[in-house]
Amino acid sequence: MKVIVAGGGPAGMMAAIAAAKCGYQVRLIEKNEKLGKKLFITGKGRCNLTNACDMETVLQNIISNRKFLYSALYGFSNWQTMEFFEELGLKIKTERGGRVFPVSDHSSDVIRVLEKELHSQNVAIHLRTKLTHVLVKDGHVTGIRLSDDTEIFADAVILALGGKSYPSCGADGDGWRIAKTLHMNTVEAEPSLVPLVVRESYAAKLQGLSLKNVRASVYYGDIKLFEEFGEMLFTHFGVSGPLILSASSHIRESMYAQNLRLLIDLKPALDEKQLDDRILRDFGENKNRQFRNSLGKLLPVKLIPVIIELSSVDGEKRVNEITKEERRKLVGLLKALPMTIIGNRGFDEAIITRGGVSVKEINPATLEVKKIKGLYMAGEMLDIDALTGGFNLQIAWSTGYAAGSSIGN
């Protein structure tokens, strides 16, 4: 049986390996000049392969259509992923939050072992080869057409063409264009796991400041969309970092024009009374100190001028002259530093794409397109996405494996 896999990312490489292990003659085509171009930059070039948590936690970290993924994830779990790579000779390690990386901290080593396995399984790799059409006759896939009008015939085709994030790596949403030519329903693509743009100018003043152990909450009007504890970063345009990227997964594009608020609790370990008591102690130690010089034990130096400005308390004022009302306002700021979210940084900086081919079009057990026999889809081109921590790559491995190993079943 002849199988074509279109897309040389994680889902496509896994699908090609799985199909070849079933004894099929497999061709892997990729429009870029090399395989795994986006995989190379994941995890800041370290490649967060998966997460060493239990399956319930994996599922909790999936944002869109987690039920659809039950079969694929249980068929090729995060633990099987780790075992798979270890058997290929990749040494791996587990870090904070269960994040799994290659010991070398080089994503190139992940790509290298995958390429070696592809060659070992006699997969024919065609680089700089772009698919433009899927050929279908009488409800059954018959092959593909390339950009030079060459037609390649096959008994099964797996599409793993990725999303729109990181267009510098060749991502262009081609998979959805092809899906539409096949009369399949798609969900509009949006950037996800993406830095956020805020209205307030003080964010730019804090550029480069990283905050650990803070709590971020996002409100859409009176509705709380997100609340989580973690690490964030101020930038010239707004905010980024793991906590903010996770928050972005809960925000739809249509919300940015509305009342979308971000509140940062700078001292989540203290309630308001405990924080007030702490401030009183700090003030009491130096009663004649100016307000601007009294917050060094409480806040990073870069943040102090911004907090003073927002508090409306004169920085020259002696701490023993600060009123209870002024102190209460300071406590409120530290517990809920306010920002207005007005947008995101788009597909250029988004880690993943939310949206894609509707999962209603796909058999969840096999990843086969319901109305086209022999056509399968896997990875980011499907309407499935998850939070950071290795979960999106796990989706790619699991769906790629499910598609490749289900052919002929």
Image (spheres, grey):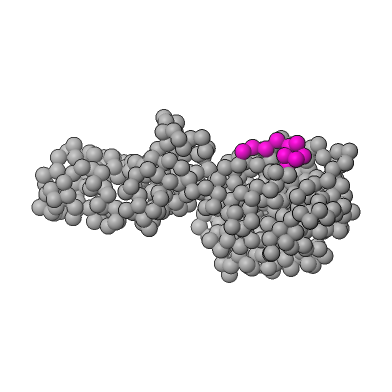
Quadrant assignment for the C terminus: top right
Residue depicted at 59% across the width and 46% down the height: 353
Vertical side of 336 occupied by 404: above or below:
below
Q: How many marks?
A: 0
Instruction: Place residue 311 in its image quadrant.
Output: top left
Q: Is residue 308 left or right of residue 380?
A: left
Vertical side of 107 occupied by 369: above or below:
above
Which one is in front, 332 or 60? Answer: 332
- Which residue, as the protein is rendered here, is positioned at the far top? 222
Residue 333, given in percent of the width and then of the height, sits at: 29, 42
Residue 185 drawn in magenta: yes
Which one is in front, 278 or 170? Answer: 170
Quadrant assignment for the N terminus: bottom right
Residue depicted at 55% across the width and 49% down the height: 347
- Which residue, as the protein is rendered here, is positioned at the far front? 148
Residue 273, given in percent of the width and then of the height, sits at: 26, 40
Q: Find the magenta span and give its range.
A: 179-188
Instruction: Place residue 329 in its image quadrant.
Output: top left
Is residue 408 at least partly visible in the picture?
Answer: no
Is residue 136 at least partly visible in the picture?
Answer: yes
Residue depicted at 66% across the width and 50% down the height: 162
Instruction: Place residue 136 in its image quadrant.
Output: top right
Residue 369 drawn in magenta: no
Residue 189, given in percent of the width and then of the height, sits at: 60, 42
Residue 117, given in percent of the width and then of the height, sits at: 75, 65
Q: Is residue 82 left or right of residue 98?
A: right
